[in-house]
Amino acid sequence: MGAGEYATPVESRSDRDCDGSPPQSARNTSRTILLYGVLLGFLLLAFAMLLPCMVPARSTARANACRNNLRLIDGAKEKWALENKIEDGAPVSKPELAKYMQSGWPSCPAGGSYILGVIGAPAECSFHDKR
Ligand SMILES: [Zn+2]
């Protein structure tokens, strides 16, 4: 080493604070990343815990909507039988009952199909259990 030559410092002064730790801005960034990571972890955990609770609620809502549809079909069957003096045990047809459905023919929210049955017996859904 000649005169006037100085060994260059391994790290420039701006990379480190006086105590050798990373500067304030770098520490804040890593702290923020950690905070977001923890937050995301908690959110995922909460979502994972809530998911099983939400799935049965949705299927219960579908079953209730289906039950309500079956009630409408039964009501239409009764009306049709009364107005046409049809006796119990007589088969019913969808086009005849559709005339009594003011808001169109209902469909099972879970994709089941309705088994109309006969007059005097309740209609059933192929997907949901009997009432
Ligand atoms: Zn159904």
Image (cartoon, rainbow, N blue to C red):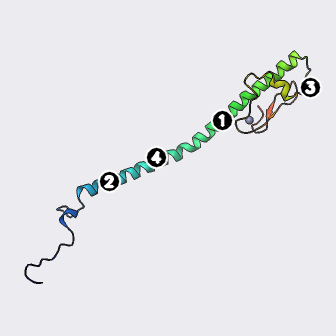
From the image, which quarter does the C terminus lie in?
A: top right
Q: Residue at x 36, y 50 (%)?
A: 35
Upstream in sequence: badge 1 or badge 3: 1
Neighbourhood count class around disc 1 (C-alpha, 10 Å): few under 14, some 14–19, many 20 upward: few
Residue behind mark 4:
43
Label 2 vs label 1: CA separation? 44 Å
User: Which is more foreground, mark 2 or mark 1?
Assistant: 2
Please say if the residues under marks 3 and 2 sit with CB atoms less than 8 Å apart: no
Upstream in sequence: badge 2 or badge 4: 2
Label 2 vs label 4: CA separation? 18 Å
Residue behind mark 3:
90
Up-down: is 84 above or below 58? above
Q: Position of residue 21 (x, y in %)?
A: 23, 62
Q: Residue at x 72, y 32 (%)?
A: 66
Location of residue 129 by image quarter: top right
User: Which is more foreground, mark 1 or mark 3?
Assistant: 3
From the image, which quarter does the N terminus lie in?
A: bottom left
Q: Secondary structure at mark 1?
A: helix
Label 4 vs label 3: CA separation? 57 Å
Q: Residue furthest bottom?
A: 1
Upstream in sequence: badge 1 or badge 4: 4
Q: Position of residue 56 (x, y in %)?
A: 63, 39
Upstream in sequence: badge 4 or badge 3: 4
Q: What amino acid type is highlighted by mark number 3?
A: Ala
Up-down: is 101 above or below 3? above
Mark 2 close to ligand 1, CB under 8 Å: no
Residue behind mark 1:
60
Horizontal side of 67 relative to 120 (left or right) equals left
